[in-house]
Image (cartoon, helix red, strand yellow):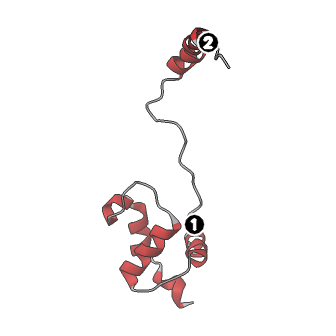
Amino acid sequence: MRDLTLIDARQRTALLQSPLTHGFGTELWTLKRVRVLIERLYGVTFSEVHVWRLLGALGFSSQKPERRAIERHEDAVLTWKRKTWPALKKSVPPKDD
């Protein structure tokens, strides 16, 4: 299969680098970005479905970034939820309809 041989060590190395290194705006690889990268490196265009299959053949899997900040302080969040938020809720005057 010609297309599988196109995605070789060079492509794997490129994917292990930051997307920022390749001119993308964030640290997140997407199928669309991988597709663009393949086109830049090899001049070959694949569908996103095919890119998905190629990535799977290389051992890559789908990952979702965590939805919380790395700098999050769990104790501070818990304190805010237990003390600050209830106090704020009590201080809001009822609406007059």
Label 2 Cα crowd, 10 Å radius (few <14 / some 14-19 / many 20+)? few
Residue type at numbered disc 1: Gly
3 with respect to 18 (left or right):
right
Residue 18 x %, y %: 37, 58
Identify whether 40 is placed above or below 67: below
Q: Is residue 6 above or below residue 31?
A: below
Residue 40: % across, % down: 36, 79
Q: Residue at x 31, y 61 (%)?
A: 21
Give the residue at x 54% y 16%.
Answer: 80
**Residue 71 in picture, x, y percent from top left:** 43, 31
* Residue sticking out furthest to the bottom: 2
Q: Tell which of 71 and 91 is nearer to you.
A: 91
Q: On residue 59, which mark appears?
A: 1
Quadrant where the N terminus lies? bottom right
Q: Earlier in the sequence, mark 2 or mark 1?
A: 1
Q: Secondary structure at mark 1?
A: loop
Q: Nearer the viewer, mark 2 or mark 1?
A: 2
Residue 67 x, y percent position in the rendering? 55, 41
Residue ranking furthest to the front: 97
Q: Secondary structure at mark 2?
A: helix
Residue with the mark numbered 2: 86
Q: Amino acid at mark 2?
A: Pro
For residue 20, side relative to residue 72 (left or right): left
Q: Could you tell me which residue is drawn at 59 percent across and 18 percent down?
A: 81
- Structural distance between the alpha carbons of marks 2 and 1: 48 Å
Number of labels in the image equals 2
Closest to the observer, 53 or 49 = 49
